Image: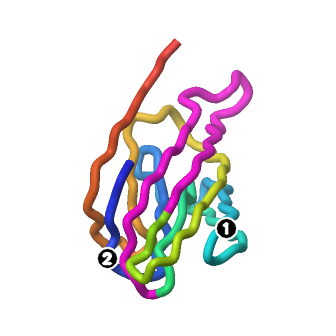
């Protein structure tokens, strides 16, 4: 997924089936021109826009398609790199879990519901 984002300080979340409930436990750690870690309970946390600048970014994120026989929990992990318009670069790495049903769609959004421009490619494998 490659995007440009125009606003500042917004988390990028991936939500299976558009589920916005607190059914997630997701985190990122980051390094580059800044370092630290954060978590989110309302989506798979892929990274964030920061510094009050726009950013070009790319995300690669994998989410399991099926849970185990005893749970509906899906797990995911991924990486993102943000190149901010002020020249700073940060790489995000993280993962988490979602306690939901079967995945029929994905929503990629910001915590401020702001518009992003970009392209998404989804690969799906069933066994």
Residue name at image x 53 percent, y 70 percent? 89
Residue 71 located within the stretch drawn in magenta: yes
Residue 15 located within the stretch drawn in magenta: no
* Principal secondary structure, stretch drawn in magenta: strand
The residue nearer to you, when weighing 78 against 66, is 78
Residue that label 2 marks: 6
Q: Position of residue 96 (x, y in %)?
A: 67, 50
Residue name at image x 66 percent, y 66 percent? 30
Residue name at image x 63 percent, y 34 percent? 72
**Residue 73 relative to residue 124: left or right:** right
Q: Residue furthest front?
A: 87
What crowding class fits label 1: few (fewer than 14 Cα within 10 Å), some (14-19), or many (20 or more)? some
Q: Residue furthest bottom?
A: 52
The residue nearer to you, when weighing 25 against 60, is 60
Q: Position of residue 87 (x, y in %)?
A: 45, 78
Residue name at image x 48 percent, y 65 percent? 82
Asked if disc 1 and disc 2 are in contact, CB closer than 8 Å, the reply is no
Rendered view: 125 above or below 51: above
Q: Which segment is the magenta one? A: 52-81
Q: Position of residue 104 (x, y in %)?
A: 39, 34
Quadrant of res 65? top right
Residue that label 1 marks: 31
The residue nearer to you, when weighing 60 against 88, is 88
């Amino acid at each position: 997924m490659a995007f440009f984002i125009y606003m500042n300080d917004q988390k990028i979340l991936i939500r299976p089936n558009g589920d916005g409930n607190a059914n997630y436990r997701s985190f990122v750690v980051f390094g580059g021109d800044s370092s630290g870690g954060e978590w989110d309970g309302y989506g798979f946390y892929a990274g964030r826009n920061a510094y009050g600048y726009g950013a070009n970014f790319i995300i690669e994120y994998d989410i399991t398609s099926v849970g185990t026989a005893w749970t509906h929990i899906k797990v995911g992990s991924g990486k993102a790199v943000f190149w901010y318009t002020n020249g700073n670069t940060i790489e995000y790495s993280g993962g988490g879990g979602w306690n939901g049903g079967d995945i029929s769609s994905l929503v990629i959004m910001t915590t401020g519901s702001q518009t992003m421009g970009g392209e998404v490619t989804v690969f799906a494998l069933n066994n």
